[in-house]
Amino acid sequence: MSGEPGRTPAPAPGAVVVTGMSGAGRTTSIHAFEDMGYEVVNNLPLSMLDTLFEPGGGSKPIALGVEARTRGFSARALAGALDLLRARLDAAPLLVFLDCSDAVLERRFVATRRRHPLAPAEEPGIGVARERDLLAEIRAAADIVIDTTMLSPHELRSELEARFSPDRARRMTVGLTSFSYKRGAPASAEMVLDCRFLRNPYWDETLRALDGRDPAIQGYVGDDPRFGAFVDQLTEMIVMLLPAYLDDGKVFFSVALGCTGGQHRSVAVAECLARRLADLGWPVSLRHSELERRR
């Protein structure tokens, strides 16, 4: 088994443009970028975006928040602004689109008693439909689409930090997420693995209340005769793929591991896989979505 963890991917972007559906987490994302050390500019008129990159400007990467209410906003205007930025930067800006299911967006607007910006005097669902139609072309052109339907604000911040933290951008990071099939797999994962074929500690009453971080659960799942070959071959496949993703300019590779409840088997496999990849020199971001939700 071999990999190239020391290789350096394409330069980190000088700018990240964050847009997407209203209510999908754009404000949370902008705050996360600010906490990561980005210079944040929010809702600047699109006609003025290129002025941020005059020669002799600051050395910090920039995160730009753009929404449907931004002055001069349209798919054509945003594409033109991105073309101008590409001409000014050594590395192309990344366009990040935050998406979410219509039903969850409507519930968020109702729960917060906010009016939808595109339907201030109508039902939130009408505004969601209008905005989805308006942004369809932009979503299709996005470099990265992050679906926040199943993400809490904390989980969204973790996802962004794993993908865009300047400290991590110099090398490929492997993002491992355990999840529950009752809630569904993360939409942004490049690879989804089903761990439900392994021995299930849930049926042992002495183990049921524990989770896959506990040595007792890891030992129980690890005693399944299929466990060793599964983790061996999974590690080998991931390490084989990472250099190809580096060659493509990616700096983040997301793997989701699921089981029925997201508490035992998927967590144990993710913990084991994280240790193996770290031992091979690959930076790893590890999240257990169901355990975070319960906490």
Image (spheres, rainbow, N blue to C red):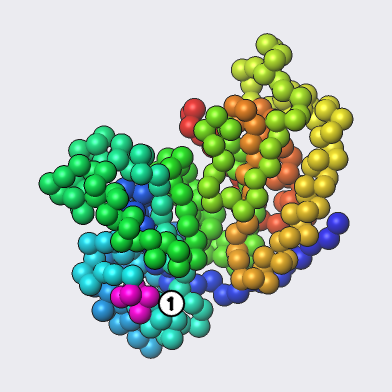
Q: Is residue 113 left or right of residue 233?
A: left
Please identify the residue farthest to the bottom as the structure is shown: 55
Q: Residue 75: x percent and y percent?
A: 33, 70
* Residue labelled with disc 1: 59
Left or right for 49, reference 185? left
What element does badge 1 sit on? loop
- Locate residue 60: give its quadrant: bottom left
User: Which amino acid is tagged 1?
Assistant: Ser
Q: Main secondary structure of the magenta part?
A: helix
Q: Quadrant of residue 198?
A: top right
- Left or right position of 185 against 130: right
Q: Residue at the top extreme?
A: 205
Find residue 131 and report its horizontal and vertical position in percent.
Answer: 29, 56
Q: Is residue 84 above or below residue 113?
A: below
The magenta segment = 76-80
Indicate yes or no whether the magenta region holds residue 18. Answer: no
How many discs mark residues in the rendered view? Answer: 1
- Residue under the point 48% across and 32% down: 293
- Report the residue at 56% width, 40% height from top: 185
Q: Is residue 165 above or below residue 247?
A: above
Image coordinates of residue 255 in percent, x first then y, are: 64, 48
* Residue 166 in sight: yes
Label 1 neighbour load within 10 Å: few <14, some 14-19, many 20+: few
Q: Provide residue 104's location: percent of width, then percent of height.
A: 36, 39
Give me the residue at 53% from left, 58% from top. Answer: 163
Q: Give the answer, above or below, for where 213 lies relative to 276.
A: above
